[in-house]
Image: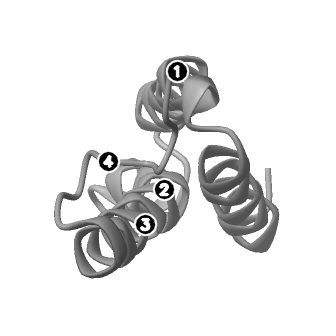
Amino acid sequence: MRGWRLALAGMCWACAIGSRATLAPATILWGCLTAGASIRRGQGTARGGGFLVAALVVVPILMGCLALGWYNAERFGSPLEFGHRN
């Protein structure tokens, strides 16, 4: 799979977590499975290229989670608070 498609998938998964926090476990699972498949295939031309390709999926997800945590901390006082009240 081409690198830009993997990066786009990672960004879309990060947006999914941002819109519905309950999707985080499934999204992280799919991201890890995709990254693992890239590493096993050894995609990329250089040694360790599979890890670089895997980073294209994982880094956008992590950046999205960090941005969401920062936003929640600024708005609600805790990175794990999403503003839902009982």
Please determine whether, in this image, residue 73 is positioned above or below residue 6: below
Label 2, label 3: how far apart the Cα atoms are = 11 Å
Q: Secondary structure at mark 2?
A: helix
Tell me the mark number nearer the camera, choosing from 4 and 1. Answer: 4
Give the residue at mark 3.
68
Marks 3 and 1, the one that precedes in the sequence? 1
Residue at screen point 32% across, 48% down: 81
Q: Are marks 2 and 4 in contact (CB under 8 Å)?
A: no
Q: Tell me the CA gap for discs 4 and 1.
A: 28 Å
Between discs 2 and 4, the one toward the N terminus: 2
Q: Give the x, y percent position of residue 69.
A: 31, 63
Name the residue that disc number 4 marks: 81
Viewer-nearest residue: 20 or 27: 20
Q: Amino acid at mark 1?
A: Leu
Q: CA distance from mark 4 to mark 3?
A: 10 Å
Mark 3 neighbour class, 10 Å CA radius: few under 14, some 14 to 19, many 20 or more: many
What residue lies at 28% left-to-right and 60% top-to-bottom? 47
Determine whether 15 is above or below 40 in the image. Answer: below
* Quarter-of-image position of residue 23: top right
**First in residue order: circle 2 vs circle 3:** 2
Q: Nearer the viewer, residue 39 or 22?
A: 22
Can residue 27 be seen by looking at this rendering? no
- The residue under the point 50% across, 23% down is 86
Could you tell me how far apart the alpha carbons at marks 2 and 1 are, in whole angstroms? 13 Å
